[in-house]
Amino acid sequence: MLSKNIEKLLNEQVQLEFESSQFYLAMASWAEAKGLNGVSGFLYGQADEERVHMLKLFHFINERGSHAAVGGSKAPKAKFKNVKEVFEDLLKHELAVTHEINKLVDACLKEKDYTTHNFLQWYVSEQVEEEKQAMTILDKLELLGEDRGGLYLFDRDLASMTAAPAADAANGGK
Ligand code: FEO
């Protein structure tokens, strides 16, 4: 059984993962409209991943005898100056998510809720990967520059970083 406080914090995390998914979906749509199909495919994949993160929390909360809540969300930012701004926003967002996960881990330790603490370790590792990936992408952008040729190569490069199922989803299963 989860304490009321841990249930509340886990549900806040549900909401944050949902907002992450919506934010990356807005980024994907922006990139797709610009004809950057590699970037949009990658971001559609990220949006799908965030939904999986949300559902993992749902199942855990419900299996522990509590109730996962579905919240609403206001429309995320939808316009970006350029691709660099997209990935700067993505990294900033992931750093904020990491901060929240760490607060949750800390609350579990204070309450001696070792089961939830153990469950959250997956998220701790995932955040390391997501931050690393966003930083690698920003490094690539820095190297290639913002000229058209560089952007073309970057777009192709991101297409190759997109997992196959995510790429399928991005193409509407075609
Ligand atoms: Fe689910 Fe990217 O944090």
Image (cartoon, helix red, strand yellow):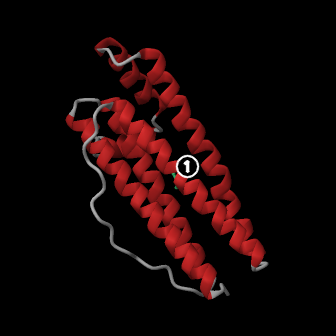
Name the quadrant containing residue 41. top left
Three-letter code, disc 1: Leu
Tell me if 44 is positioned left or right of 120 in this view: left
- Residue drawn at point x = 49 percent, y = 64 percent: 54
Determine which quarter of the picture holds residue 82.
top left
Above or below: residue 19 compared with residue 170: below
For the point 27% across and 45% down, the residue is 172
Figure check: 126 above or below 114: above
Q: Dividing the image into 4 quarters, which one contains the N terminus?
A: bottom right
Q: Nearer the viewer, residue 16 or 92?
A: 92
Residue at which label 1 appears: 95
Q: Secondary structure at mark 1?
A: helix
Badge 1: residue crowd in 10 Å (few <14, some 14–19, many ≥20): some
Give the left or right position of residue 43, taking residue 1 as reference.
left
Residue 87 location (% of width, % of height):
42, 37
Residue positioned 44% across, 44% down in the render: 90
Q: Horizontally, is 165 left or right of 113 in the view?
A: left
Residue in view at x 62 percent, y 50 percent: 126
Q: Quadrant of the C terminus?
A: top left
| Residue 143 visible in image | yes
Number of numbered markers: 1
Residue 113 place in picture, x, y as percent: 75, 78
Q: Residue 15 at x, y = what percent?
A: 45, 68
